Image: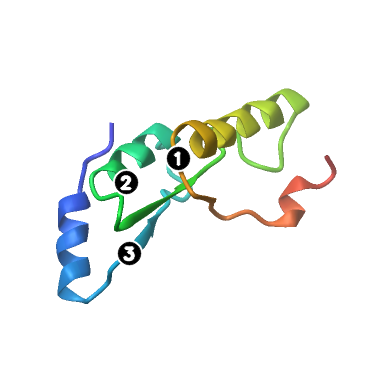
Protein backbone atom coordinates (compact mmCIF):
# COMPACT_ATOMS: atom_id res chain seq x y z
CA UNK A 1 0.00 0.00 0.00
CA UNK A 2 1.32 3.41 -0.94
CA UNK A 3 1.38 6.44 1.31
CA UNK A 4 -1.39 8.87 0.35
CA UNK A 5 0.09 12.32 -0.21
CA UNK A 6 -2.76 13.59 -2.38
CA UNK A 7 -3.74 16.22 0.20
CA UNK A 8 -0.24 17.68 0.10
CA UNK A 9 -0.22 17.56 -3.71
CA UNK A 10 -3.53 19.43 -3.90
CA UNK A 11 -2.29 22.04 -1.42
CA UNK A 12 0.82 22.69 -3.54
CA UNK A 13 -1.29 22.80 -6.70
CA UNK A 14 -3.44 25.50 -5.08
CA UNK A 15 -0.37 27.49 -4.00
CA UNK A 16 0.92 27.51 -7.57
CA UNK A 17 -2.39 28.02 -9.38
CA UNK A 18 -2.48 24.56 -10.96
CA UNK A 19 -6.01 23.35 -11.63
CA UNK A 20 -5.34 19.79 -12.86
CA UNK A 21 -2.51 17.30 -13.06
CA UNK A 22 -1.82 13.76 -14.27
CA UNK A 23 -1.25 10.96 -11.77
CA UNK A 24 1.06 8.27 -13.09
CA UNK A 25 3.41 6.27 -10.87
CA UNK A 26 6.11 5.71 -13.48
CA UNK A 27 8.28 2.67 -12.93
CA UNK A 28 6.95 2.01 -9.41
CA UNK A 29 5.00 -1.17 -8.75
CA UNK A 30 1.79 0.56 -7.63
CA UNK A 31 -1.15 -1.05 -9.45
CA UNK A 32 -3.85 0.76 -11.39
CA UNK A 33 -6.23 0.26 -8.46
CA UNK A 34 -3.99 2.47 -6.28
CA UNK A 35 -3.86 5.16 -8.97
CA UNK A 36 -7.68 5.10 -9.17
CA UNK A 37 -7.97 5.48 -5.37
CA UNK A 38 -5.83 8.61 -5.43
CA UNK A 39 -7.73 10.09 -8.38
CA UNK A 40 -11.05 9.42 -6.59
CA UNK A 41 -10.00 11.85 -3.85
CA UNK A 42 -10.18 14.77 -6.31
CA UNK A 43 -11.59 13.52 -9.63
CA UNK A 44 -12.07 17.00 -11.10
CA UNK A 45 -8.40 17.85 -10.48
CA UNK A 46 -6.48 14.60 -10.83
CA UNK A 47 -6.27 12.70 -14.14
CA UNK A 48 -5.21 9.08 -13.72
CA UNK A 49 -3.01 7.30 -16.25
CA UNK A 50 -2.96 3.51 -16.38
CA UNK A 51 0.12 1.34 -16.55
CA UNK A 52 1.09 -2.15 -17.67
CA UNK A 53 1.26 -3.64 -14.21
CA UNK A 54 4.27 -5.78 -13.38
CA UNK A 55 4.99 -6.77 -17.00
CA UNK A 56 6.67 -4.07 -19.06
CA UNK A 57 7.72 -4.03 -22.72
CA UNK A 58 9.66 -5.52 -24.27
CA UNK A 59 7.71 -8.58 -23.17
CA UNK A 60 9.49 -11.87 -22.60
CA UNK A 61 6.51 -13.94 -23.73
CA UNK A 62 3.07 -13.62 -25.32
CA UNK A 63 1.59 -14.57 -21.92
CA UNK A 64 3.30 -11.61 -20.23
CA UNK A 65 2.13 -9.33 -23.02
CA UNK A 66 -1.48 -10.48 -22.46
CA UNK A 67 -1.22 -9.94 -18.69
CA UNK A 68 0.08 -6.42 -19.32
CA UNK A 69 -2.75 -5.66 -21.74
CA UNK A 70 -5.28 -7.03 -19.25
CA UNK A 71 -3.91 -4.63 -16.61
CA UNK A 72 -4.18 -1.72 -19.03
CA UNK A 73 -7.72 -2.66 -20.01
CA UNK A 74 -8.74 -2.95 -16.35
CA UNK A 75 -7.32 0.50 -15.64
CA UNK A 76 -8.96 2.17 -18.61
CA UNK A 77 -12.30 0.34 -18.79
CA UNK A 78 -13.05 -0.66 -15.20
CA UNK A 79 -11.31 2.06 -13.20
CA UNK A 80 -11.94 5.01 -15.52
CA UNK A 81 -8.28 5.99 -15.88
CA UNK A 82 -7.94 8.32 -18.85
CA UNK A 83 -4.59 7.65 -20.48
CA UNK A 84 -1.54 5.44 -20.65
CA UNK A 85 1.83 6.72 -19.57
CA UNK A 86 5.28 6.26 -21.08
CA UNK A 87 4.47 4.26 -24.17
CA UNK A 88 6.66 4.29 -27.26
CA UNK A 89 6.21 2.26 -30.44
CA UNK A 90 9.64 0.66 -30.12
CA UNK A 91 8.53 -1.02 -26.87
CA UNK A 92 6.30 -3.33 -28.93
CA UNK A 93 9.06 -4.69 -31.17
CA UNK A 94 9.08 -7.46 -32.42
CA UNK A 95 5.57 -8.50 -31.32
Check disc 1: other Cα within 10 Å, few if <14, some if 14-19, many if 20+: some
**Count of labels in the image:** 3
Q: Looking at the image, is mark 1 or mark 2 earlier in the sequence?
A: 2
For label 2, the crowd category at 10 Å Cα-Cα, with few meaning under 14, some 14 to 19 and many 20 or more, is: many
- The answer to whether residue 51 is left or right of residue 24 is right
- The numbered disc on residue 39 is 2
Mark 2: secondary structure:
helix
Q: Residue furthest top?
A: 63
Tell whether 22 sits left or right of 19.
right
Q: Earlier in the sequence, mark 1 or mark 3?
A: 3
Depth check: 1 or 14 in front? Answer: 14
Secondary element at tag 1: loop
> Measuring 52% from the left and 42% from the top, which residue is drawn there?
51
Question: In terms of image quadrants, where is residue 31?
Answer: top left
| Residue 40 percent coordinates (x, y) | 29, 42
Q: Residue at x 53, y 53 (%)?
A: 85
Work out how far the residue at label 1 is from the one at label 2, CA to CA, in angstroms: 10 Å
Give yes or no for contact between labels 1 and 2 (Cβ–Cβ under 8 Å): yes
Identify the residue position indicated by label 1 in the image.
Answer: 80
Alpha-carbon neighbours of circle 3 within 10 Å: few (<14), some, or many (≥20)?
A: some
Q: Position of residue 68 (x, y in %)?
A: 62, 32
| Quadrant that contains the C terminus | top right
Find disc 3 in the rendering and name its residue: 20
Mark 2 vs 3: CB contact within 8 A = no
Instruction: State the separation of the CA atoms marked 1 and 3.
Output: 16 Å
Above or below 86: residue 65: above
Q: CA separation, marks 2 and 3?
A: 11 Å
Residue at x-position 25% and y-position 50%: 42
| Secondary structure state at the residue bearing disc 3 | loop
Label located before the other in sequence (2 or 3): 3
Q: Are marks 1 and 3 in contact (CB under 8 Å)?
A: no
Amino acid sequence: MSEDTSGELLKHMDWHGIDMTVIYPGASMFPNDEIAKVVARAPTRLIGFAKYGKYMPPFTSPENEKLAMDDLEHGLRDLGLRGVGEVSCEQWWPF
